[in-house]
Image (tube, rainbow, N blue to C red):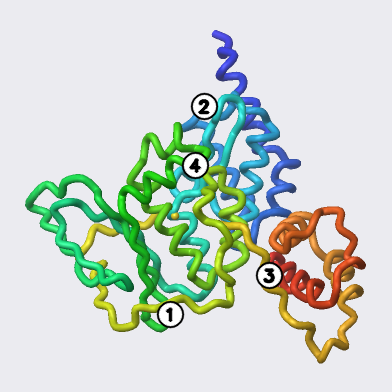
Amino acid sequence: MPPTAAVQKVQKVKSLIASDDFQKQLAMALPRIVTPERFIRVALTTINKTPKLAECTQSSLFAAMLDCASLGIEPDGRRAHLIPYGTTCQLIIDYKGLIELARRSGELSDWKAVLVCDNDEFEADGEAVTLHRINYREPRGDVFAVYSVATFKDGVKSYEVMTRDEVEAIKGRSKASGSGPWKTDWSEMAKKTVIRRHSKVLPLSAEFRTAVEKDYDSLPDLGSMASALTPPQRASEAKDVTDEAEVEEYTTPVEEQRPAPAPEDGGKVDWIATAIEAEKNAPAGPIKRARKACSMADDLELQTLDDTALAGYVKVLKIEMGA
């Protein structure tokens, strides 16, 4: 019995994903921590689980996959989701994916988002969560708040708390509010929302900010992210209560131009020549991401930039290259 048209589409898409050409594109985009072979296996599993992705345009499906690849996040339905909106595939990065990116920055040892329900014991003093105790013998009731707790390498913790009303207000402004995870996994999206708001005061990488920009569920609430060099407010004396709470890891970045560092060697470096040489030795993927992170158009002539902007761009490009 010949396969149906839907099955044929799935088979065709899976064949294209497994092709040598797509694997070469992945190899250019992927960081060293993920191999093309592993990424393709995850992508094929995703197509099996969500056959409607085969109905999407190939350009939107492959673009979403390559965006995932450039961030080093697998579209496994846990860190990132490929969601078919009609015939367009959109990338939605999970809060678990955001947390994974944040940990790679080297500044944080842990980051969690926690739901607070009506029957929980909960106290916060405006700077930190000082008490969260759950009675697992009784129903917890409805969610009335969610908080984020980030732990730095030195053990110091930073908190962000949002009420349910605040989460709902942001959901209402989301492009994806009417379908997808907001409909099927409200709790996970609430955690993602508080993680994203908290990210504005944490020292996170350009990679994290790029992920926020690529996320289809981008939120106007984010505004401009605080400088990656700005130290966050820390609740150094706050009691760590997350071990008592129901903590599930799960997280998505944000538009901001990385502050350009001052030229090194007292300004003696020929930054135009340095930038041109850096681009000459870099694949297209890292160049595109670095230019986007620095708010530079793809066709912008490097000669039009001053030394400070060029120095900043070179440093971001080196980060994208894994240098």
Discs 2/1, front: 1
Q: Which residue is mark 2?
A: 51
Mark found first going from the N terminus, 4 or 1: 1
**Counting other residues with Cα less than 10 Å from the Cα at mark 3, is it few (<14), some (14-19), or many (20 or more)?**
some
Tell me which amino acid carries mark 1.
Lys
Disc 2 or 1, which lies upstream in sequence? 2
User: From the viewer's perspective, is 144 left or right of 160?
Assistant: left
Viewer-nearest residue: 207 or 47: 207
- Does residue 232 appear left or right of residue 277 in this picture? left
Q: Amino acid at mark 3?
A: Ile
Mark 4: amino acid:
Ser
Tag 4, which secondary structure?
A: loop
**Residue 195 x/y as whole percent:** 42, 59
| Residue at the (76%, 69%) spot, across then down | 313
Could you say which disc has been placed on residue 153 in the image? 1
For the point 45% across and 73% down, the residue is 108
Taking 181 as reference, is 218 above or below it? below
Q: Nearer the viewer, mark 2 or mark 4?
A: 4
Looking at the image, is mark 4 or mark 1 nearer the viewer? 4
Seen in the picture, residue 295 relative to 157 is either above or below; the reply is above
